[in-house]
Amino acid sequence: MKLRSFGRHGFNCSEIGFGAWAIGGAWGAQADTDSLAALHRALDLGCNFIDTAAGYGEGRSERLIAQVLRERATKGHAEKIFVATKTPPTAGLWPPSPYCVADERYPEAYLRENVAERLRNLGTDRLDLLQLHTWTRAWNRNPTPFKVLRALQREGKLGLIGVSTPEHDQNCVIDLMRGGWVDAVQVIYNLFEQEPAAELLDVAKECGVGIIVRVAFDEGSLTGKFTADTKFPPDDFRRGYFEGDRLARTVARAEQIRADLAGTNLTMAQAALKFVLAHPAVSTVIPGIRNVAQAEANCAVSDLPPLSAALLQKLRRHNWRRGFWYGGK
Ligand SMILES: NC(=O)c1ccc[n+]([C@@H]2O[C@H](COP(=O)([O-])OP(=O)(O)OC[C@H]3O[C@@H](n4cnc5c(N)ncnc54)[C@H](OP(=O)(O)O)[C@@H]3O)[C@@H](O)[C@H]2O)c1
């Protein structure tokens, strides 16, 4: 497993991190035994970065991670595992609308209580990285929630401070990076969503901000395992994400990527992760992992050679901005 510096923060993180949403819930049936085994296997393979959130099964994901870290400490593992978690805004619109008020969605008392709960769930007295789970650019000129988090950092409860981008306006974090409000940003960057390559990733590099890339597989479609007839169980959020004609349209595009990989010996999942890692601003990519086989397949990607310049050039053509109507469907 190769390591990369996490922005300017003096910590080397594994290129492949562990996305711990599905082990919390919302992805259909998930046995804790599979989740625990997957976490152990990934850490054994050199993964030292885990991303979780309060909302992943109302703390279930965090508690499983704490259990694994306890088990490993008991066995005498000396490794430092970096755990990033997230605090959501108070109940209301998600993502926050331009009219939401920062002090109402992330009030100080709430942030303090929520951080205390994250500390309890993770069994620690200091969080390595606390990310606000979503944001709106409406708050950029007076980002009061980050002032509270900086105070919590000074009090020793937080290591680093970050934000996870709202998917409709990822660039809203650029001003936060330039203003020195965030140490890390979590962003969607994948073979379909390449917009962060326009500016966000370069600004992160300039500012020494750690970049955590989420959804590298577009929730699974970029692994190439779906067909237009794939059905998701009712308790799998992908039933909504790929609703209507979205799945068929996505699969058709994924098949074009498969065609571009002919003769490369790369699986689609490998190419999806390597594409992300090709950008020098990326600190770690955190594919969602829910079993040992996925831990092994994804961790192994770090040691594969980088994509050739010619293949990278080809893959850039798959950039797909889903939010635009003028081009038609
Ligand atoms: N707003 C936010 O901050 C936010 C939002 C989303 C995600 N995240 C974070 O980012 C992480 C990654 O995103 P994600 O989990 O949503 O999506 P993802 O990484 O695009 O897809 C993960 C899913 O792909 C499947 N998979 C994993 N490895 C595979 C492999 N090698 N071959 C085939 N299938 C494989 C697994 O599901 P199946 O086995 O069921 O197919 C897995 O749950 C999350 O776990 C979470 O930590 C944060």
Image: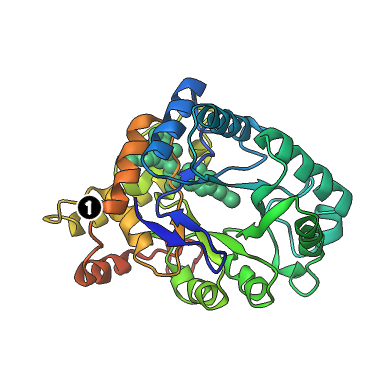
Query: What residue is pinned by disc 1?
Result: 258
Task: Tell me if mark 1 has few (under 14), some (14-19) or many (20+) residues whose alpha carbon lies within 10 angstroms of its own.
Answer: some
**Residue at the spot 37% in from the left edge and 61% down from the top edge:** 277
Residue 321, quarter of the rendered image: bottom left
Residue 153, quarter of the rendered image: bottom right
Residue 191, given in percent of the width and then of the height, sits at: 36, 60
**Residue at the spot 63% in from the left edge and 42% down from the top edge:** 53
Residue 137, given in percent of the width and then of the height, sits at: 70, 69
**Residue at the spot 68% in from the left edge and 73% down from the top edge:** 180
The residue lying toward the viewer, choosing from 80 and 305, is: 80
Q: Is residue 158 left or right of residue 72?
A: right
The residue lying toward the viewer, choosing from 19 and 234, is: 19
The kind of secondary structure element at disc 1 is: helix
**Residue at the spot 58% in from the left edge and 62% down from the top edge:** 185
Residue 171, quarter of the rendered image: bottom right
Query: Compared with residue 310, is residue 243 higher up or lower down, i.e. above or below?
Result: above
Residue 295, given in percent of the width and then of the height, sits at: 37, 37
The residue lying toward the viewer, choosing from 291 and 283, is: 283
Q: Residue furthest right?
A: 109
Q: Amino acid at mark 1?
A: Arg
Q: Is residue 167 left or right of residue 260?
A: right
Q: Residue furthest left?
A: 263
Asked whether the viewer can see residue 208, the reply is yes
